Amino acid sequence: MDMKIFQKFFLTFIFSIPFFSCKSMIFNKVGDMLSGADKNGVPVKAKSDDANPMSAFMGETDIKIIQESLPIIVKMYEILALENPSHQGTQIMAGQLNIMYGNLCVQTPAEKMPIDMLFEQVDEFNRAKSHYIKGRKYILDAFESRWPGFTEAFLSADPEKAKPVAQKISKSDINAAYWAAAASLIAWSLDPLDITMLTSIAGPVALLERAAELDPDYSNGAIWDALCQFYAAAPIDFGGDQERARYCYEQAMRVSEGKSPGIYVTYAQSFCKPRGDREGFVEALENALAIDVNENEANRVMNVLGQQKARYLLDHVDDYFLEW
């Protein structure tokens, strides 16, 4: 190589080191701030006077504005994740937002489609499922970087392989674990005949059970609610357990103090509808609608969503119960 060219290359490289180092520091700081977790995926403890950017999202009452803005937010975090793939906090948040998008912007509207739009509804459910799987992958990739082999074991059809990896998570991993596991179970619920999803649910359930063990009061009973829905809906051969479902429902009610509309919706759909209990179905949904969503600002958007679902189910109660 020509010495002058080498010198030019060397000097350029030397002077660029501070720039790239600075760039890395900036992206890590931005990632910490926007994801609420550091580059290792550990939640960052906020100061008492720090503003929480997620409160603008989770405290909203207008579901439509969330549905309209969420696609942009999802893409912003995906860009950040692409720019800084080693920042686990950003990766996990990109995954969480994809899962939120699939639920709020795709699945929820699709559930209200009339029967004559069945094919369109199936297409939307498949779209939602793809976002659940995509979001899950972001989170599993973060776990995989810490514990090689985690993803394969988590998705294994063999419970003896799937369950041990769930024990690897600590209390700081609960939020990520919840979203990854919930995404798996919701994706399965949208397509219960997908044998790949059906045979790989041992890992998600084990992860939720581990999360419930570490923090039974997480997010107003969200873990217990997800477990209740699974145990009530799954075939016995794949882990379904009505007694365990009832226990999980009771724990969800305990943690939420009966102030979470979504848990009443779960009770109506998971217990009342299968046994033909129209009266219990209506009562549970009316209890959901009686809750003041402003009592819990941190979960307000989810409570509003739960009430919207309760109202829709009540309006269509005759579709679920036949009068003889």
Image (tube, helix red, strand yellow):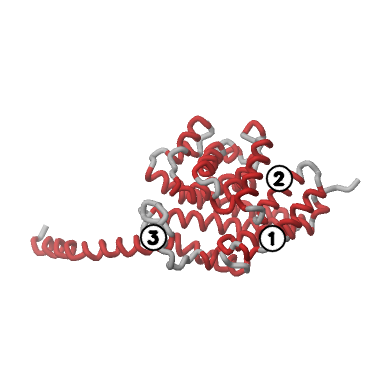
Q: Which mark is residue 291?
A: 1
**Percent of width and height locating residue 148:** 38, 40
Which one is earlier in the sequence, the residue at label 3 or at label 2? 3
Question: Does residue 49 appear in this view?
Answer: yes
Task: Report, in whole angstroms, how far the alpha carbon at label 3 lies from the one at label 1.
Answer: 35 Å
Q: Nearer the viewer, residue 109 or 60?
A: 60
SS type, badge 1: loop
Residue 205 in which image quadrant = top right
Quarter of the figure with the N terminus: bottom left
Residue hosting label 3:
32
- What percent of the width, then of the height, locates residue 168? 43, 39
Name the residue located 37 percent from the left edge and 64 percent from the top edge.
30
Mark 3 packing: few (<14 Cα in 10 Å), some, or many (20+)?
A: many
Task: Give the residue at x 54% y 43%.
Answer: 212
- Quick one: label 2, few (<14), some, or many (20+) residues within 10 Å? many
As shown in the figure, which amino acid type bears the numbered disc 1?
Ile
* Circle on res. 176: none
Residue tagged by mark 2?
A: 270
- Which secondary structure, mark 3? helix
The amino acid type, in three-letter code, at marker 3 is: Asp
